Image (spheres, rainbow, N blue to C red):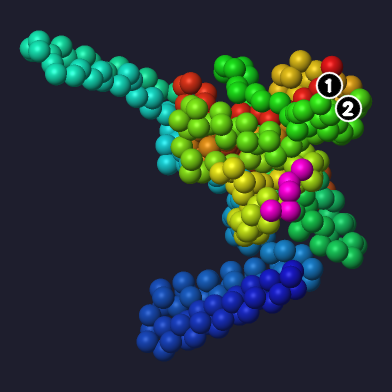
Amino acid sequence: MKNFKQFLVATIGLILFASLAVNAFAAVAHTDMLTASVAVGGAGFVFYQLSKLQPNKPAAFTAGVQVELWAQYIIERFWKDNAFIKRAFSDDDKVLAGKVVHIPQPGAKPSVTKNRGSFPAAAVRRTDTDIVYVLDEYTTDPTHIPDADKYELSYDKIDSVYGDHAGTLVEFVADDIILKWLDETVSNVTKLYTTGGGGDTPIQVAATTDAATGNRYGTHHLDLKAWELFFNKNNIPKAGRQVMFESNMLDQFTSSLTNTQYRDFSQYYNAAEGTLGRLYGFDILDRSNVAVANSAHAIKALGAAGAAGDCAVSLVWQKDAVARALGDVKFFENPDRAEYYGDIYSALLRMGGRRRRADNLGVGAMIQGTPA
């Protein structure tokens, strides 16, 4: 890749050098000495820049293009690795000053009177409010690549560093967006618990989160049925309902399906959209980890240490009940830093999200139930 870039830059430079040289000779022929001087000077500058190009070393004046390309790569990687975030209401066009989003909240609906007999009817002013959330700034710690590494290593370490920064950044941000949708510091979030199918002998499984011990009730298809009934009762729109299972919980869920249910479930498989199936009106997704609740069933903060009583959590939501907004995405490249004897690289992404409804309905946590 580097050799190709060097070849491309050198080729363009030679073409420019030749063009300037021809213009210089033409100007001399027409006794236009000012034009000739400018052309000669330009040709000399290009020749000087070409002379600085070294094999296996990126040209200094291509750095800006590389930075833009890698910023775009971070965006593409973000949506590819975390397609579930697209299944939310987008506030990308509502970001103010690159940092703040306002979500209008309509006031009380008008009352209805049957066979009105008293006039004039009283006019009631509707008072609207709004919900505000701020985009957080996520940054990676800078990576230092010594100058020698760019020549002595058998693989392209710079490209590897780019990939590391993009992958780490997008995974961290996606984890945090889930917790923003389940944020208990705003107000209570809906929680329903796995039952193992209920009955006299509910299914129990071993705890799987870090440091957790003991058993939890397995995830049964009837647990998703309970969410369907809850959403229906609260008039949550039927379109755009999703559930993202933690991987172990998904395995328990599919194991509880009858052959007929599994056949119907599988008909909706769509790899391009990340949909594994559909049941009870929910598109079913999965993720290696979604969130974790403590022994009191409170959602734990990102990066919190594991504990014996922890329970795995799956996310249930309707598309318009949660919001997300993507702000600036930047990749920083500081080549040839004298104090580091090499290059420095880092990345930045601004993103925010939250529940959209003031009543907090339409999104919640399916938490592993704990046997008494």
Query: For residue 208, which quarter of the picture?
Result: top right
Secondary structure under tag 1 reads loop
Predominant secondary structure, magenta span: loop
Residue 331 horizontal/vertical position (percent) = 64, 48
The disc labelled 1 sits on which kind of residue? Pro
Residue 22 horizontal/vertical position (percent) = 49, 85
Left or right of 334 in this view: 200:
right
The disc labelled 2 sits on which kind of residue? Asn
Secondary structure under tag 2 reads strand
Q: Residues within 10 Å of mark 1 (few under 14, many from 20)?
A: few
> What residue is pinned by disc 1?
371
Q: Cα distance, mark 1 to mark 2?
A: 7 Å
Residue 227 horizontal/vertical position (percent) = 60, 32
Is the residue 280 above or below the residue 106 in the image? Answer: below
293 is within the stretch colored magenta: no
187 vs 217, nearest the viewer: 217
> What residue is pinned by disc 2?
215
10 vs 1, nearest the viewer: 1
Which range of residues does the magenta coloring cover? 256-260
320 vs 55, nearest the viewer: 320
Residue 319 horizontal/vertical position (percent) = 51, 40
Q: Residue at horizontal 81%, vertical 30%?
A: 202
- Whether tag 1 and tag 2 are in contact, CB under 8 A, the answer is yes
Give the position of the C terminus as an image quadrant.
Answer: top right
